[in-house]
Image (cartoon, rainbow, N blue to C red):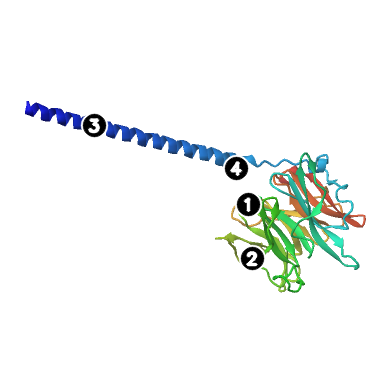
Amino acid sequence: MKFSGNILVFILIVLFVFIQCTSKTESNQNQQENSVSNKIDHKAEDKEELTSVIFECNYFNNPKPSLKAELFAPDIFVNEDHQHSSPCFSPDGKEIYWSSGIRVKNTKSRKQVIYFSRYEDGKWSNPEIVSFSGDYSDGGPFITYDNKKMFFYSNRPITQGAKIKSDDDIWYVERVDLNWSEPIRLQFNTDFNETMPSVSEKGTVYFAAQYKEEGSFHIYYSELKDGLYEQPRSIGPSINNDFRMSPYIAPDESYIIYATLNAPLKISFRNADGSWGKHRSLGSIINTGKSQRFPMLTPDSKYLFFTSYKGGKEERYWIDAEFLFK
């Protein structure tokens, strides 16, 4: 009987251990299933977050153009003294920014300021000067594709209270809710002109600069590495063989559109080896004025904006961008 009792105790211990192990295994399986479920849910949330920003813009209720350049929103820009950029759109199409020249009170001089309008409650707000602009000459706004930064050029002093610069530098501001931070100067700026920034999806800044050794404006680029912008490099002799300015770089850097001195807007496509192909004019449907400048595509690449100087003034035009890729 004593031996049988020992067997009974042994069996009970084995059963207890088995039940505990089974319970632990089921608990681990449930935890793993919950973990996988959470990962799937997070992936779904991430995907939803990535796809939730869709570019939708009613362009101040202007009818969309076809393959013919049309004036863009002339009633919005009617009171501007001098139009000096194309409109730049936020990735969701709910904000529009642009720069224009205004007369300085009690003087004959003029400076640039950056305006904006926001689409709220089914209508566009009245144009206002953006929070960081107005005290100095600021121009060429460009919003990054993640909607987190806006690049622009300015003659503002490097440090507060210092003298206004005699040249332009490239600056950026960071989005803070519905407003912008204080401007931050890019470290590669010099005492020569760096202007008209355009930024690719991966953060590379393309811009026009007038460096002393070259005399006229040429196009340069600076890559973003480990949070810092590298020393600018020339885009190369195939493009910089004459006066070049106001570049627009494609989001994936596969093509670039730029202005020439009192001549047509041109486009160059990147070759498979990374070099730039032979440039071509955008043709007579674009280049109809004395000069064309400031090319800018909408974030969805459907429409091309630019300025054209006709009849004694420079105005903003837009056109269906389909012709660029034929």
Residue 5 at x, y percent in the picture = 11, 28
Q: Earlier in the sequence, mark 2 or mark 4?
A: 4
Q: Amino acid at mark 3?
A: Phe
Residue 324 at x, y percent in the picture = 73, 46
CA neighbours of label 3 inside 10 A, class few (<14), some (14 to 19), many (20+): few
Verify CB contact (< 8 Å) between mark 2 and mark 4.
Answer: no
Number of disc labels: 4
Question: Which of the two residues, 55 or 310, is positioned nearer the viewer here?
Answer: 55
Query: Could you tell me which residue is drawn at 76 percent across and 40 percent down?
Result: 121
Q: Earlier in the sequence, mark 1 or mark 3?
A: 3
Is 203 above or below relative to 243? above
Query: Closer to the observer: label 3 or label 2?
Result: 3
Residue 271 at x, y percent in the picture = 63, 53
Q: CA distance from mark 3 to mark 2?
A: 72 Å
| Residue 201, disc | 1
Query: Could you tell me which residue is drawn at 61 percent across and 67 percent down?
Result: 231
| Residue 50, disc | 4
Label 4: state its secondary structure: helix
Q: Amino acid at mark 4?
A: Leu
Residue located beneath label 2 in the image: 232
Q: CA distance from mark 2 to mark 4?
A: 31 Å
Q: CA distance from mark 1 to mark 3?
A: 61 Å
Q: Is residue 238 visible?
A: no
Query: Closer to the observer: label 2 or label 4?
Result: 4
Q: Earlier in the sequence, mark 3 or mark 2?
A: 3
